[in-house]
Image (cartoon, rainbow, N blue to C red):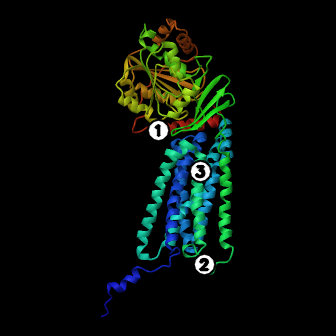
Amino acid sequence: MTTVTSDEQKPHLEESIAPAAAHPLHKWLLVVVVFVAGAASLGVEMAASRLLAPYFGSSQFVWAALIGLILLYLTSGYYLGGRLADRFPQPVVFYLITTIAAFTIGLIPYISRPILLWSLKAFATYSASVFIGSLAAVILLFAIPVILLGCVSPFAIRLLLQQVGRSGRLAGQLYAISTAGSIVGTFLPVLWLIPNYGTRFTFLVTAIALLLVSILGLVVSSSGNGGRPRSDQKPGRLNKKSLLSLLLLIPLGLEFLTLGGPIKPASGTDGGGVLIAERESDYNYIQVVRVDSEMQLILNEGQAVHSVYDPNSILTGGPWDYFMVAPYFNRPPFTPAMVRRVAIIGLGAGTIPREITAAYGPIPIDGVEIDPTIVELGRRYFAMNEPNLHVIVQDGRYFLRTTAQKYDIIGIDAYQQPYVPFQLATEEFFSEVRAHLTPTGVAVINAGRTSHDFRLVETLAQTMHAVFPNVYIIDTARFTNSIIVGTNAETSLSDFAINAESLTNPLLANVAQASLAFGNIREEQGRHVFYTDDRSPIEQLIDQMILDAIRSGDE
């Protein structure tokens, strides 16, 4: 009987494969490229979300479309990379793939610009097919670079593989290195590059970093071990390949010269206005636009004005005016002296505190704003310098959970029209708001709508009515908004009319009388919880409202 020893089995388990990158320098360079490519793949995804936000917003639908297609591209890249690696197991092919990926990454923000501007025209003319088509076209721009980035890890495994018996260890190491790069590519753009330098700069830095290591790889792979020329290398081959790759740096370098232009045209009212300032913060794409004598704060896709400032007028005609008259739904007689402290969640550039200070005097106002860049712009361009305004840079819901103050008015204007952060629209949130009201306190919410579609207003009002004893709705004179008021005490609609008649302050009287005359004031009778912390399908409702508005031409 023949006995086979374990030593005789070992060669079969560890079948040798000729590695395509045997020299230590080649191995280390491949590892570096895998790390940089991993960082580039997530860096592109993070930057892509900010590229789309000023035009399409950052709703769950946009994020799902972006992430889903990125994963589809990576899946295609993994498959394609494995096939190419088996057919062309040469380092030069590997580095050509990453070189092309780097160059196409650098082109994304510039090729996408005309398509993004096309989407603005589509939204303005209510063309649903063009709007959705432009979103798809922009996301398809990421196909080539992301598919090529997906080729990197399987290709690198094939180049470094020496023994089948160790293939699992090698694959695990390279995917760990790639994932470590992806972690860097997630946090570096979000925490440093985008807030400090912008989205386009982030794309270019990612592209140039990947291109530089790819060029170095081409130079080394076109040489012999340790960079010495191979005996069979034809004169001029190294120079041609390297020169071609180096030439790709020229257009990417020239793109830096165009970084100073605006990301998108001014999105103010009456044709857009004049762009005064533009910022990309950790939370928003921000524009400050001047329309005649009025400064306007525009965020993200620009479908709403979030704050205004006119040095010649206190009242705006917009939703901000109505916050100061909300307490007069209380039982009469209710006087201005009974409003002693106010909180505004979603301070913006300070339009509401300016009006409340003008109407009530220097009463304490806590203004909560999550975005410090908006606060900075508010102080610079919107005269947000009231001495009684205490600015708190914090999440609104966290603020409520950590403060012991009681307020006569809690205003919520943190909604990023047309979208609403779901956590600021739930039954639990409204319960927290009511817990911080005085006995005659009121909660006031600014909600968007179209001229005929009030579904968002009604679902918010009914959810509030599950918490507050009485809820009222006022349609604003300017812009398609409605103000929803929840009272902490038992009240009636007639109370507002009685209190309005006794107002002597001209600002309060003006807004109260306009509300009665033109605001279609009504009490919400429904009491149904549409939104909770566990289930809040508010984005789906807004998406449906947008599509219906586009189809019908409603504004």
In the picture, measured across the screen, residue 167 lies left or right of residue 245, that is left
Q: Which residue is mark 2?
A: 230
Q: Quadrant of residue 245?
A: bottom right
- Measured as percent of width and height from the top left, residue 264 is found at 65, 39
Q: Between marks 3 and 2, how big is the CA–CA gap?
A: 36 Å
- Residue at the far bottom: name it: 1
Q: Quadrant of the C terminus?
A: top right
Q: Amino acid at mark 2?
A: Arg
Residue identifier under label 1:
537
Give the mark nearest the N terminus, 1 or 3. Answer: 3
Marks 2/1: CA distance? 64 Å
Q: Can residue 158 be seen by looking at this rendering?
A: no
**Mark 1: secondary structure:** loop
Near mark 3 (Cα within 10 A), the count class, few <14, some 14-19 or many ≥20, is many
**Label 3 vs label 2, nearer the camera:** 2
- Closest to the observer, 368 or 28: 28
Q: Hey, what amino acid is under mark 3? A: Phe
| Res. 424 image quadrant | top left
Q: State yes or no: discs 3 and 2 in contact (Cβ < 8 Å).
A: no
Give the residue drawn at x 40%, y 30%.
399
Looking at the image, which is closer to me, 217 or 76? 217
Marks 2 and 1, the one that precedes in the sequence: 2
Callout 2–callout 1 Cβ contact below 8 Å: no
Classify 535 as above or below 359: below
- At label 1, the amino acid type is Pro
Q: Where is mark 3, residue-wise? A: 203
In x, y percent, where is residue 289? 63, 30
Q: Earlier in the sequence, mark 3 or mark 2?
A: 3
